Image: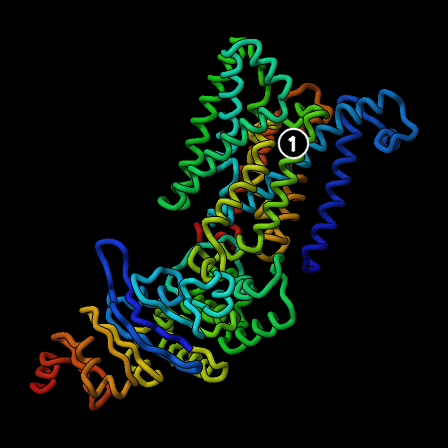
Amino acid sequence: MSARVSTSVAVLIAALGALALLTLTYGQIALPLADTLGALTGTQSTDLARQIVLDIRLPRVVAAIVAGGALGMAGVLMQALFRNPVADAWSLGLLAGGQLGVALTVTAAAFAGPAAVSFLTLFEGPSITLAAAVGVAIAAFAMLALGRRVGAITLLVIGLMLGFTSQGLTSVLLHFAARAGGRIYGGWQDASFAGVAPEALPWLALPILLGACAAVATAKSLSSLLLGETYARSLGVKVTALRHAVLAATVLLVAPVVAFCGPVSFVGLIAPHFARALAGTARILPLLPLAALGGALLALSGDAIIHAPWEQHFLHLNAILAIVGAPVVILILIFSPAVRQWR
Amino acid sequence: MLDLQSLTVGYRNARGAVVSDIDLSAAPGDFVCILGRNGSGKSTLMRTIAGLQTALDGAALLDGEDIASMRPATRARRIAVVLTERQFNPGLRVDDVIALARQPFTGWQGGLAEDDRVAITDAVAVTGVEPFLRRFFSDLSDGERQRVMIARALAQTPHLMILDEITAFLDLPSRVEIMAMLRDQAREKDQIVLLSSHDLDLSLQLADSVWLLDDAGGFSVGTPDELSRSGAIGGAFDTGAIRFSPERGRFEIGAAGVGCRREA
């Protein structure tokens, strides 16, 4: 790892740690830093502080970091796989596909009767992760197949349109699911890290960890795919197998995020650009930790803004990500030298 | 040593065989120019030899091993290609592009060892791409991009280098420089260089051997001198408007043009 990359990683880790601590201290009830640290380390602290920090805020902060990191890495994979600087799990409709998978499963259970609903509630972690994974995988393979026929911009528009369609269907389905007695996924469609229960954290983190390993394993070959398919083959890469491996990694990274946090937008699109600028290279391996940390930082910042002690609750995650993220993407597209030729 | 054994290249569709039954060989250090008009099958032949396309029949052997059945990783250590295809790559810089050539030789992380760095430095020096190493690849002009891809192929330290139409975007001095450099590299490093070109004059002056493809699927091989004298070059390229002159070793404007000059 070059000095430039390791310095950036160290700085990002420090920034992420500081932001995480800050996020743990404030909210509707402000806690002194000493109490927060005490609750975290299990030493001197009040019961109230411990409850607020460990039971309420920590799972949210961990979920934001893990989910943001996963989306950042998935963004790196998607942008390299599609050779498209605005590709990511959200823009190409993978998140929406995952949502539709979950909505279909929940609705099916609601109509199947109380037994199915209670089964789904009991095995909520694995079942909704799996449902999301199926949805994400179908969307991903559809995009990959389409990507070989249409240009990058057409693919992007198709991805966004399919995303809107899936989201529309999801909202209709969830309405019926709620009427039929299924679980109501309140706020899920707007994306949130607050809904992740502590016991759900392993179901969020485990697939993401596997996905991260798969991403690291494919990184070298994926770098040569940046030269195009034929050059990659001339460098000894089995392109079809690589594509499938990268998609599998993407599904593992993205599906748990959709399942537990909803369609978190923009993080996966922006983090890779940020990583490339810091690393000074487009090689995949150094980008992965930087994009993971950058994504985590973005997601946690969004979460921190929402949970600042406002007078009333008026912000949701995708609102703040869109308000900040969309202009950033526009600026990247207009000014970034890295995408000049693509424009 | 490159051996083509009754190699037939083409497509398993309506287009069918493009060039059939090629038997020939090239020795290390040979600078071979492949000449022929558009659509005569130069690219198909080169892609097949590179192992990027399957042969319809026969085989291409490098150092006695069938290229098509080599393990992809082995093939990547022995054969480098430069092709005409262009793709957009977000954020890819020139030094990344050249360093990617070393992937067949590096570990799972793709980290560069000392000999990888030496190969890269050499390739950068002989191609003169040093000034734009930190620029974005997609920002380069077509000519600069060709140079970078040639540097990348050299950095792959192959036994066989296959270059398709690489001089198309270069000006005349650059073409001469690049082709002469490739010939010198071939001799110095005992590499076989196969290069397709529309640059007849230059190819005929520099090549050790010429593979000539005509429109009818015909194939002839020889030194530039042999092929000019036998009329094979004229056979492949002459039209009503231009004619190859074996005496002068170059093309001349045909009957209509000559007639004009006489009148003046």
Q: In which quadrant of the rendered view does residue A120 lie?
A: top right
Residue indicated by mark 1: A204
**Closest to the observer, B22 or A80:** B22
Q: Answer whether residue A328 is visible to the viewer in this image.
A: no
Find numbered disc 1 in the image and state the secondary structure of the residue it sits on: helix
Q: Residue placed at 63% from the left, 62% from the top?
A: B111
**Closest to the observer, A37 or B156:** B156
From the viewer's perspective, tell me whether residue A60 is left or right of residue A341.
right
Q: Answer whether residue B30 is visible to the viewer in this image.
A: yes
Vertical relation: B162 (above or below) A21: below
Q: Where is residue B106 in the image (x, y as percent from the top left)?
A: 60, 63
Q: Residue placed at 40% from the left, 66% from the top?
A: B50
Vertical relation: A313 (above or below) B235: above
Q: Badge 1: few (under 14), some or many (20 or more) residues near its Cα, within 10 Å?
A: many
**Closest to the observer, A250 or B139:** A250
Q: In which quadrant of the rendered view does residue A223 lie?
A: bottom right
Q: Position of residue A200 (x, y in %)?
A: 68, 26
Residue that extends furthest to the bottom in the rendered view of this protein: B247
How many numbered discs, if any?
A: 1
**Closest to the observer, A31 or A222:** A222
Q: Position of residue B169 (x, y in %)?
A: 36, 69
Q: As shown in the figure, which amino acid type bears the numbered disc 1?
A: Leu
Q: Residue placed at 45% from the left, 28% from the top?
A: A164
From the viewer's perspective, tell me whether residue A273 is left or right of residue A2.
left
Q: Residue placed at 51% from the left, 30% from the top?
A: A134
Chain ID, mark 1 = A
Q: Position of residue B149 (x, y in %)?
A: 46, 67
